[in-house]
Image: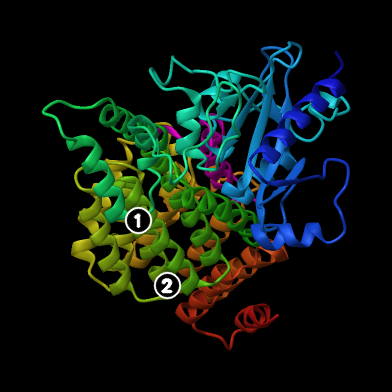
């Protein structure tokens, strides 16, 4: 039996099932009728929709978008990127119908509502055309096992007995009852399956129990549950046991269901780390666009139902991406927006239960105040971060202590700043190698040295500052631009305070002219302007030249 023949069987089973439910079916697998596409787009509020069948209710309203898959053997079920995007974008309106055992005389149709809850796994390297081979119609990048399909879906056979049992996952429950819980539409009567009870023909207690949990009216649902569970006897009835089992099993599915799998979650967790290593070398406006796109994807995942353990990890990713957006916005000079992103990041970190990340975002907000606001505000936020971080020593601790010391130095509170610098040096010596490798959420040695040098600069300890700055510049690779430029501007400030304004302006001019235009961001120009105010002597030739450079 060919693949096309298996697909025809699968589509036929799906169409017959829909028609048996009283719904009208349009096959769009080989083309969309004129006018149907815009209707579906309006119905789903998504531009990402693709499917094999469009099902309508008897009144003509849209009911389901159905993707059909056929399998002749025990192989996994796969969908391509385009179908995966449709599944994620259309939500509960997108259904997956899988026909299993199509090579036998008794194929089974499995109906899966909200298939995004399945643990889809992306094959390694599956991007575009897998491994350079041309894609065939049924070859997909996202895979899920038949066992997972049977666990979440509802399996039917086209001939009596109409439903199969899944005794492993739902002991004592037939697929008919499970289907009744998930899909309340009437099922077709067969020789071995009696017609659905009408108002003149009351349901048996066990059948009524299967529908109790679907009742939308809360008071009516409570009354029905109470009637079944309390009953008229001293014992517990079979119907009550069925309702209890159904409630428990529905909760199990709700708690275990997820729109993403572990591999996808791990990919998101590495994304922030990759941005962290790029932000010193790639212009921030380029990175910001990508971070915002990724942030909206994570936001969409958080808006969907996720297990608690996955939600916390996604919240942590959201907090990291918000931190990066704030860092890039601050580098571009958008300090108000940067503060907003750091606030959003703190909310996400708090939701994730990660006080270290929450403290790190508070430190980042303090840095914005240090560059664009007042030293007093920076000091207050850094002190608040210390309270959030507690006694745990990490990279946020060392950054926070240095920000606090730098703020105090700018306020002239030397005696308070010096002990904080000693604490920062001690804390940095206790960081792990991993912490010292991450320039965004860790604290590298070169970053530590330039922050320390900035503190010495504003404390008036020029010789100490010069030595630390020299060590820091030796550690920065030539591909990193932002921090080395700020260090050289700090060196220019040291020269100005040492009574060498002409040399100070030359040093600052060299720092800016060596910087590629796309890296002359708002932060760099603000830093350079602050240096010019500190240096004074603007009437000097070098001072006038630097002023022209700032205006250019």
Residue at 31 percent of width and 37 percent of height? 429
Viewer-proximal residue among 249 and 260? 249
Viewer-proximal residue among 446 and 460? 446
Residue at 50 percent of width and 25 percent of height? 175
- Depth check, mark 1 against mark 2: the one in front is 1
* Residue 497: image tag: 2
Whether residue 543 is in magenta: the answer is no
Q: Which residue position holds label 1? A: 217
Q: Position of residue 461 (x, y in %)?
A: 34, 61
Say whether residue 39 is left or right of residue 377.
right
Give the secondary structure at mark 2.
helix
Q: Work out whether 267 lies above or below 330.
A: above
Q: Main secondary structure of the magenta part?
A: helix
Q: Earlier in the sequence, mark 1 or mark 2?
A: 1
Q: Quadrant of residue 96?
A: top right
Give the secondary structure at mark 1.
loop
Specify whether residue 398 is in view: no
> Where are the magenta residues, as a range?
256-283
Q: Work out whether 179 lies above or below 462.
A: above
Q: Work out whether 420 lies above or below 496.
A: above
Specify whether residue 407 is in view: yes
The N terminus: image quadrant: top right
Q: Position of residue 66 (x, y in %)?
A: 69, 41
């Amino acid at each position: 039996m060919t693949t096309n023949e298996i697909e025809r069987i699968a589509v036929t089973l799906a169409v017959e099932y829909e028609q048996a439910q009283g719904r009208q079916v349009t096959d769009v697998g080989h083309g969309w009728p004129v006018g149907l596409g815009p209707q579906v787009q309006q119905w789903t509020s998504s531009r990402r929709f693709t499917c094999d069948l469009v099902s309508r209710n008897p009144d003509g309203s849209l009911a389901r978008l159905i993707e059909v898959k056929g399998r002749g053997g025990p192989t996994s079920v796969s969908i391509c990127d385009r179908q995966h995007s449709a599944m994620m974008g259309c939500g509960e309106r997108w259904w997956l119908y899988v026909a299993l055992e199509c090579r036998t005389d008794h194929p089974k149709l499995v109906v899966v509502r909200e298939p995004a809850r399945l643990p889809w796994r992306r094959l390694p390297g599956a991007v575009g055309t897998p491994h350079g081979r041309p894609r065939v119609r049924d070859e997909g990048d996202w895979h899920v096992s038949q066992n997972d399909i049977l666990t979440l879906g509802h399996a039917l056979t086209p001939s009596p007995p109409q439903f199969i049992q899944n005794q492993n996952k739902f002991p004592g429950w037939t697929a008919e009852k499970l289907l009744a819980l998930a899909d309340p539409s009437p099922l077709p009567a067969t020789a071995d399956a009696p017609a659905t009870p009408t108002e003149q023909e009351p349901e048996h207690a066990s059948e009524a129990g299967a529908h109790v949990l679907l009742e939308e009216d809360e008071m009516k649902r409570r009354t029905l549950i109470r009637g079944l569970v309390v009953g008229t006897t001293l014992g517990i009835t079979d119907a009550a046991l069925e309702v209890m089992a159904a409630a428990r099993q529905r909760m199990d599915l709700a708690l275990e269901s997820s729109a993403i799998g572990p591999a996808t979650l791990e990919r998101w967790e590495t994304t922030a780390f990759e941005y962290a290593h790029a932000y010193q070398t790639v212009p921030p406006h380029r990175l910001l666009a990508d971070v915002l796109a990724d942030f909206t994807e994570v936001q969409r995942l958080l808006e969907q139902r996720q297990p608690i353990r996955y939600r916390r990890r996604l919240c942590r990713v959201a907090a990291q991406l918000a931190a990066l957006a704030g860092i890039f916005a601050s580098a571009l000079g958008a300090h108000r927006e940067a503060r907003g992103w750091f606030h959003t990041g703190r909310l996400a970190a708090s939701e994730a239960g990660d006080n270290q990340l929450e403290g790190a975002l508070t430190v980042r907000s303090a840095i914005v105040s240090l560059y664009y606001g007042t030293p007093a505000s920076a000091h207050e936020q850094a002190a608040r971060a210390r309270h959030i971080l507690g006694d745990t020593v990490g990279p946020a601790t060392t950054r926070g202590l240095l920000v606090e010391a730098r703020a105090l130095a700018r306020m002239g509170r030397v005696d308070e700043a010096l002990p904080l610098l000693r604490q920062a040096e001690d804390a940095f010596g206790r960081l792990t190698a991993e912490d010292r490798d991450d320039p965004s959420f860790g604290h590298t040695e070169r970053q530590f040295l330039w922050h320390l040098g900035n503190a010495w600069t504003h404390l008036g300890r020029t010789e100490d500052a010069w030595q630390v700055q020299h060590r820091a510049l030796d550690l920065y690779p030539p591909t990193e631009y932002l921090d080395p430029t700020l260090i050289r501007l700090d060196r220019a400030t040291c020269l100005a305070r040492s009574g060498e304004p002409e040399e100070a302006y030359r040093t600052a001019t060299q720092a800016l002219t060596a910087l590629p235009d796309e890296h002359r961001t708002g932060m760099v120009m603000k830093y350079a302007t602050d240096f010019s105010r500190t240096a004074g002597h603007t009437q000097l030739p070098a001072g006038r030249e630097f002023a022209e450079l700032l205006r250019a």
